[in-house]
Image (cartoon, rainbow, N blue to C red):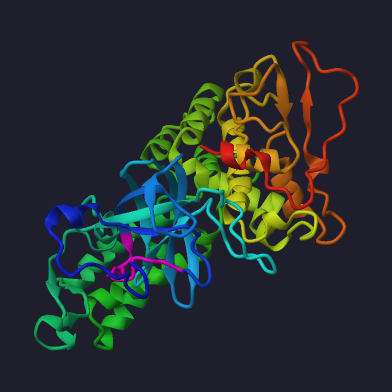
């Protein structure tokens, strides 16, 4: 897993091999950068990753290992040259071997990098491990990773069938390598009647791409591209790809096409609703309702909106909308004052928690049917109902209590610290705590007229909620 393999005894029985693991007391950062280097994604696609890991405790001299004292969060990244990291997911591991599973999309030639996210990262000039105690320090041990994939629900894939239907395929000639290392250039779709098959398949593809029926004149524009490619001896496969590429570059695919000004037609309404909430074209149910001209009815439109919001694909809308609205991707480029908040530096877990909290809070609000469903009668800032992250919440000078454990009726305006970091000024807005709206109202059903002033986190101190992170 490491770039330099750890030393192991020469004689090992199977029982010992099953118990072996690679332990780290620091998170993955220079110069300790661990990865499952023997694995490289063969092709881009969906993969299932399974990990076995556990937390442990080791003495200050690194000679005696005992059982861990708490679960530890682990973040999984994909890694590609030149050190381009992409977060795939995260989970907690317990004090005994814990198996966790992720289904993720990987790009070709990526490898996998695990990160014990809570552990120490070297911060000059003080390189000491702040988690070290008199009797030792925490660590995380990684045992193994299993990879299954690429996962394919159907073969040929839906995109291939849309473009080529059920036409037969053959392997293309070998292009590189010898013996078992031979690599083919993919498959070739063959047709006994290229002209007729091209027209039938192109019309079907265009109706799907344009989200509407197409006439003969429109089909003819792009059919001529395919026919021209065939005439100069390009294969049927390459000619179909040339024609479909031209379709995907056309205005009718790239822009909405409302035929008449005024009230939106059902088809146009389906397009806008789907691209707004899913960042994708309407599915079969939306298209069918639009075809029957039922989508404009208020009850049908509301039901479809709720269906789209309750689908996992709606998170595409959350990410795209918040990234443009709040500039969330810039949060890593705007850091608070290093002297006041040294622990913020190099803490990917904290930054990722800030952005995740913001997205989850917004997503939960968007899914709620009413304000009362989302926040109840306690109001907008109910800490027990807001997906506040205990780590970031406490760091920003907030309540300091994990979600669901706030005493009395403490309230916090979720995500404010993430928004402040993303939208703030590098030098002027070092005081992140001025965005922490945390107030203890006791048992009063309504907030008082004046809110208490936010508290400043002490310079150089670790965040109080760090050890409370589940």
- Could you tell me which residue is drawn at 74 percent across and 35 percent down? 398
Q: Quick one: quadrant of the N terminus?
A: bottom left
For this rendering, which residue is in front, 398 or 55? Answer: 55
Task: Indicate left or right for 208 with 368 as reference.
Answer: left
Tell me if residue 99 comes above or below residue 328 in the rendering: above
- Residue 119, placed above or below residue 402: below
Q: Which of 197 and 385 is in front in this view?
A: 385
Disc tally is 0
Residue 247 falls in image quadrant: bottom left
Is 71 magenta? The answer is no
| Residue 376 percent location from the top left of the image | 65, 17
Q: What stretch is highlighted in magenta?
A: 33-45
Percent from the top left, x then y, of residue 447?
Answer: 81, 18
Q: Is 457 rendered above or below residue 40?
A: above
Q: Can residue 224 be seen in this view?
A: no
Q: Is the magenta stretch mostly helix, strand or loop?
A: loop
| Residue 37 located within the stretch drawn in magenta | yes
Is 276 rendered above or below residue 188? Answer: above
Tell whether 71 sits left or right of 180: right
User: Residue 380's image quarter?
Assistant: top right
- Please state the horizontal and vertical placement of residue 228, each as a whole percent of the image: 32, 82
The picture places residue 126, in percent across and down from the top left corner, at 68, 65
Taking the image as shown, residue 163 lies to the left or right of residue 437, namely left
């Amino acid at each position: 897993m490491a770039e330099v393999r750890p030393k192991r005894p020469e004689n090992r029985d199977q029982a010992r091999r099953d118990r072996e693991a690679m332990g780290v007391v620091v998170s993955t950062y220079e110069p300790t950068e661990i990865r499952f280097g023997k694995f490289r994604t063969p092709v881009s696609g969906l993969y299932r990753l399974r990990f076995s890991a556990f937390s442990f405790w080791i003495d200050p001299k690194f000679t005696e290992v005992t059982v861990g004292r708490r679960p530890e969060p682990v973040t999984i990244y994909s890694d590609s040259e030149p050190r381009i990291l992409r977060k795939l997911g995260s989970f907690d591991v317990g004090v005994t071997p814990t198996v966790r599973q992720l289904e993720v999309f990987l790009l070709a030639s990526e490898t996998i990098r695990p990160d014990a996210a809570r552990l120490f990262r070297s911060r000059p000039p003080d390189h000491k491990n702040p988690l070290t105690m008199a009797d030792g320090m925490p660590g995380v041990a990684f045992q193994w990773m299993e990879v299954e994939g690429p996962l394919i629900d159907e073969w040929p894939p839906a995109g291939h069938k849309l473009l080529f239907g059920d036409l037969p395929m053959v392997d293309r000639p070998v292009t590189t390598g010898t013996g078992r290392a031979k690599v083919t250039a993919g498959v070739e779709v063959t047709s006994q009647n290229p002209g007729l098959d091209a027209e039938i398949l192109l019309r079907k593809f265009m109706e799907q791409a344009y989200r509407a029926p197409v006439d003969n004149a429109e089909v003819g524009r792009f059919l001529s591209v395919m026919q021209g490619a065939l005439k100069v001896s390009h294969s049927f496969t390459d000619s179909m790809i040339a024609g479909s590429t031209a379709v995907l570059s056309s205005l009718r695919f790239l822009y909405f096409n409302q035929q008449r000004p005024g009230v939106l037609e059902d088809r146009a309404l389906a397009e806008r609703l789907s691209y707004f909430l899913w960042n994708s074209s309407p599915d079969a149910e939306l298209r069918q309702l639009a075809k029957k001209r039922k989508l404009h009815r208020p009850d049908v439109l509301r039901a479809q909106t709720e269906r789209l919001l309750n689908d996992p694909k709606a998170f595409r809308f959350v990410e795209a909308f918040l990234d443009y609205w709040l500039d969330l991707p810039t949060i890593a480029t705007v850091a608070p004052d290093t002297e006041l908040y040294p622990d913020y530096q190099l803490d990917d877990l904290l930054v990722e928690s800030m952005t995740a909290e913001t997205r989850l809070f917004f997503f939960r609000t968007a899914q709620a049917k009413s304000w009362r469903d989302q926040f109840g009668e306690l109001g907008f800032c109910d800490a027990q109902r807001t997906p506040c992250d205990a780590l970031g919440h406490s760091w920003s000078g907030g309540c300091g209590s994990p979600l669901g454990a706030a005493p009395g009726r403490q309230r916090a305006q979720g995500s404010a610290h993430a928004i402040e970091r993303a939208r703030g000024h590098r030098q002027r807005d070092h005081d992140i705590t001025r965005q922490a709206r945390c107030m203890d109202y006791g048992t009063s059903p309504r907030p008082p007229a004046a809110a208490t002033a936010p508290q400043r986190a002490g310079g150089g101190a670790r965040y109080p909620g760090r050890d409370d992170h589940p």
